[in-house]
Structures are given as C-alpha cells and as structure tokens.
Image: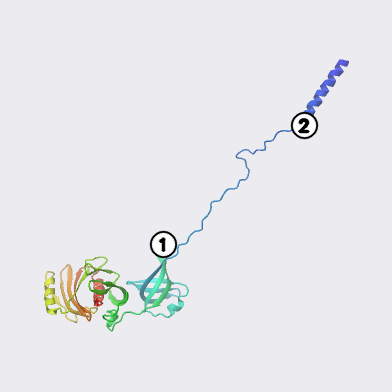
Amino acid sequence: MKKQNTISIILLTVVAVLALSACGTKPQTNSTAPQGSDQPQTQQQPQVKPETIAESEVKKGTGVYNGAADPHTVEIGTNGEAQSFQLGDGLDTAIAGLKEGDTVAFEYTEKAVEGDATAKQLTLTKIQKTEAATDGNQNGRAGQAVGGERTKTQTFDLTLEGKKEKQTATLAKGEGYSLYVFDPMSLFPDQNRVALAVDDNYYAEITKLPSDFNLDELQKEGEKDLASIGKVQKLDKAAIPEALSSSRLFLQASSSKMTQQYIVVENKTGGFIVKVNIPQGEPAEGFQSYIYTSLESLQANK
C-alpha cells in the first residue's frame, strides 16, 4: 500500500512538472517578414520634365491691303495671291489707319491648324503703310528717280491675268547695271540673264551698250538675229507694251514654238540691248508682264 502511494505521488509530480513546462513555453514568432509580403512599399515616380514650347518664328512680307474680312481678320495680297491674317494684340489702331489698296509692310507668325497638316493660321504682329514706287511715270514703273540711290525693294503696278495689282520686287545687280526682279524670276549675273524660276527657257538677256551706240546698226543686228525664228516685225510706239515705255527699238519674230524679241532700252543712265525668249506656253503672259516691268527699271551703274 505504501508502495502504491509512493508511485502515485511520483506520477502526480511528473504531471505537475509537465503542466508547468507547457505553460512556460511560448511559441516562437518569426519577426522577419517573408519576401513578397503585403507590406506597403513606396514606389518612385518618374520625373516629368516641363514641356518646352517653341516660339513661333516671326516672318516679314509686303503686299497690298485688301480690307477687313471681319473684326479679327484682314486680307493682304502678296505675290499674286490674297491671304487672310488674324489680327494680333494691339493692331486695331494700325488697321484703322489703312485703306483698301494701300501698300503695306508687315510681320506675322505661322501656327499649324490642329487636325489639318496642310493648313496654317497666320497672325499679324505688325503692319504699316509704305509708299508705292513713283517717278513721274504712269503706274510707278521705274521705281524711283533715274540715277538716284536705289532701295533694296520697290513696289510696282502690274497687270496679271487682266487684273491690276501691286507687287514688290528686289534690287538685283548685273554687269554694269541694276534692275528690280520679282519673286517668280531670278537674275543670273554670270549670264546677264533674268529667267523665270519655274522654267528658265523664259528669259531676258541684258547687254549694256556703249554711250555712242548706233540705233540703225542695232536694228540690222536684231533683224539678223531673229530671222531664223520667222518674219521680223518692228513694233511702232503704239504696239510696244505699255510697261516698257523706255524702249527705243522693239523687234519681234514668232514661230509655232516661241517668240523672240530684240529690244533696245534707253534712259538717262544709258542704253541696253535685251534679247527676250518666250516659249509658247501657259507662263508666257505672266512672264511678259514681269519682265517688261523689270526692264523698265534698268539703270546703268555710276
């Protein structure tokens, strides 16, 4: 009996020890969060650079003021075409002082129109009236007093496709002379030739004459030059183009393919032989208006 009590006491002691051990043991926790846990993370945002807005290039032009299309838009004729311009800030006063037909110099910017890659919005930033060329001749053809100091550009009256309009030409210098040349043409000084840009078969070849030239001898020379083209005609004063009033001699011959002219131009600065080549074609009419006006502005260098 005593032995059984001893065993019972031992068993109770073991159970008590085990119970106390269980109560004192705490489960271990992993303080290190596993990779890929749902811990919030701060993401670095890409740095956005401010967009650079390119400034519009300011362009310059000259033309004829055709009037206002509406309170915010005006029309200017330039290089044979009418163009519409939006009014920039502060231009109301400048526009109010203009009349239709006034020759103007202006500055403007271009901006692409959204949705139309070919269209551009033109906005005036400056406009002012300029004086058209006059020298006492009809239509201001010579551009200034003969023999005087010449400006870099000059505005002239032209008749194109039956309509009168004003266009600006640029001073160009050849061998011993100068003249005003319009945008559709260029002067090639090494050839002493003014030619149409789109087709250089339309041209005028210029030769400065000595002061003692003989008009009768020049007529014989011209008739010989033109004989291969066809029958040579000498135009009387009434038949000579109005734009070329300084012509002393005007010979012409035509074929089915072209017209050639031999012209002697003379003014107070000197005389010139001009050989004009005009193929039969669409540009012929416009070319003649441009070239005769340019030839009327011929001046020998001092």
Residue at disc 2, secondary structure: helix
Q: Amino acid at mark 2?
A: Gly
Q: Is residue 258 visible?
A: yes
Mark 1 and mark 2: span between their CA atoms? 83 Å
Q: Which residue is mark 1?
A: 116
Name the image quarter holding the N terminus: top right
Q: Earlier in the sequence, mark 1 or mark 2?
A: 2
x, y percent for residue 30: 67, 36
Q: Which residue is mark 2?
A: 24
Q: Quadrant of residue 153?
A: bottom left
- Residue drawn at x 13%, y 71% is 225
Question: Are the residues tagged 1 and 2 within 8 Å (C-beta)?
Answer: no
Q: Is residue 152 left or right of residue 222?
A: right
x, y percent for residue 163: 29, 76
The count of marks equals: 2
Q: Quadrant of residue 294?
A: bottom left
